[in-house]
Amino acid sequence: MNELREEQAKRLLNDPMFNEAFEQLAEHIHTTWIQTSVKDVESREQSWLSLRLLERIRLHLTSIVESGELARKVKDIHI
C-alpha cells in the first residue's frame, strides 16, 4: 500500500499539468495578496494562508515519496 501511495505522489509531483496548476494558483494568490489594500487585513491573511496551504500540500506529497525511498534504503541495509 505504501508503495502505491509513493508512486501516486511521485506521479503527481512529476505531472506537468499538476505543476502548472500549482504555479498558476500560487501566482494568482500572490497577485491578489499584493493588490490588497493596506486596510484589508482579512484578505491579505487569507491569501497568505492559501499560499502556505499550497506549500504544505506539495511538501506532504514530497514527504510521501521521500519516506518510501528511505524505507527501501533501510530495508536494503537490513537484508
Image: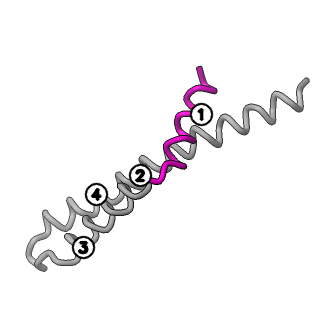
Location of residue 3 by image quarter: top right
Three-letter residue code for mark 1: Glu
Residue 51 spot, x, y in % from top left? 33, 60
Q: What stretch is highlighted in magenta?
A: 1-16
N-terminal-most mark, 4 or 3: 3
- In the picture of the structure, the residue carrying the numbered disc 3 is 31
N-terminal-most mark, 2 or 1: 1
Looking at the image, do the residues carrying marks 1 and 4 touch, with CB atoms under 8 Å apart?
A: no
Category of crowding for the residue at label 2, using alpha-carbon neighbours closer than 10 angstroms: few (below 14), some (14–19), many (at least 20): few
Looking at the image, do the residues carrying marks 4 and 2 touch, with CB atoms under 8 Å apart?
A: no
- In the picture of the structure, the residue carrying the numbered disc 2 is 17
Residue 7 spot, x, y in % from top left? 59, 34
Name the quadrant of the C terminus.
top right
Q: How far apart are marks 2 and 3 (CA)?
A: 21 Å
- In the picture of the structure, the residue carrying the numbered disc 4 is 49
N-terminal-most mark, 1 or 4: 1
